[in-house]
Image (tube, rainbow, N blue to C red):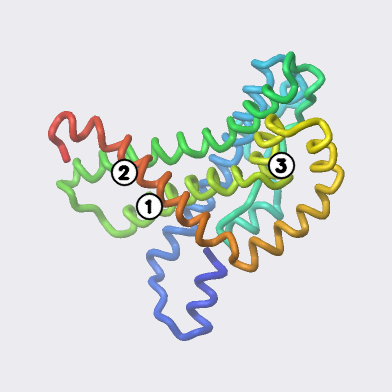
Amino acid sequence: MLFNMMSDILSGRPLDMASAISEILATLFVIFCILPLHECAHGWVAYKLGDNTAKYNGRITLNPIVSLDPVGAFFLLMFGFGWAKPVPVDTRYFKNPRRDMAITALAGPIANLLASFVGAVIYLELLVWKGLSMPGFIHDFFMAYIVINVSLAVFNLIPLPPLDGSKILGAFLSNKALYNYYRYQNIIIMVAFVILFSGILQAPLAFFQKACLNGVFWLAQLPFKLFGLL
C-alpha cells in the first residue's frame, strides 16, 4: 500500500508507477464499492435472522457514503487493512443470539471472498479474450483487487474484537468466558493493534491469505478448464 510505496522511495528502491497507480485504484474501488458490500451483507443477514436494526437505520445499502469510515479508509490505503462504519446489530431480536450473531458476522468476510471470486472470474475472462496476454495495468488492478479482498476476509476472521472473528468465536465460548472477553475488549483491541504493527501475525496471516487466494483462483478456473479455455 502507500506505506510500502513510501518505504521504497525513501530507501531508494525503484518504484513501478503504473503498478502503484493500479494498486491505489483497486484499493479505492474496494473502499467505495466492496466495504459497503461487506457491511450490507452483515445488515441483510441480520435482517433475515429477525433483526430490523440495520434496515431501520438505512444500512442495508451499497451507498458508500453511508458506510464510509475515513479512518478505516485511510488505514486500508496506507497499510492494506481497514474497515467501514459498522452496521448496528441488536442480538435481542435473534432467536438464537450467539449462533445468529456468528452467522451475521461471517457474512462480511464471505462477501469479500465472493467479491474476490467475481474479480478472479472477470480477470480470467479477460485473459482468455486477450489470448492469455493482458496489459500490465489491467493485470495489476485485478490482482490487487483480488488480493485486497482476500486479505480483508482473512483479517476480519481474526478472533479479536471488534473484528468479525470475535463475534464468531463468541458462539463457542461459555457465558463467563464471553463476559470476560467483552469486559476487557478495549485492552484486547490495544494489544491487537500492537501485535498487528509488530508483524507477529504477518506469517500466519500470509499463510491463510495464500491458501484462500489459491482456493479462489482454483474455483474461478474450473469452468474455463471444463471448456478447455485454460
- Residue 9 position within the rendered picture, expressed as x and y whole percent measured from the top left: 49, 80
Residue on which the image places disc 2: 123
Q: Who comes first in sequence, dot 2 or dot 3?
A: 3
Which amino acid lies under the numbered mark 3 shown in the image of this protein? Lys
Residue on which the image places disc 3: 85
Which amino acid lies under the numbered mark 2 shown in the image of this protein? Tyr
Q: Who comes first in sequence, dot 1 or dot 2?
A: 2
User: Which numbered disc covers residue 168?
Assistant: none
What is the CA distance from the residue labelled 2 to the residue labelled 3?
A: 29 Å
User: Which numbered disc covers residue 143?
Assistant: 1
85 relative position to 175: left or right: left
185 relative position to 37: left or right: right
Task: Confirm or deny contact between disc 1 and disc 2 (CB under 8 A).
Answer: yes
One can see residue 35 in this view: yes
Determine whether the residue tagged by mark 1 lies in a helix, strand or loop: helix
Which amino acid lies under the numbered mark 1 shown in the image of this protein? Met
Categorize mark 3 by other alpha carbons within 10 Å: few (<14), some (14-19), many (20+): some
What is the CA distance from the residue labelled 1 to the residue labelled 2?
A: 8 Å
- Residue 160 position within the rendered picture, expressed as x and y whole percent measured from the top left: 69, 47
Can you tell which quarter of the image residue 14 is in? bottom left
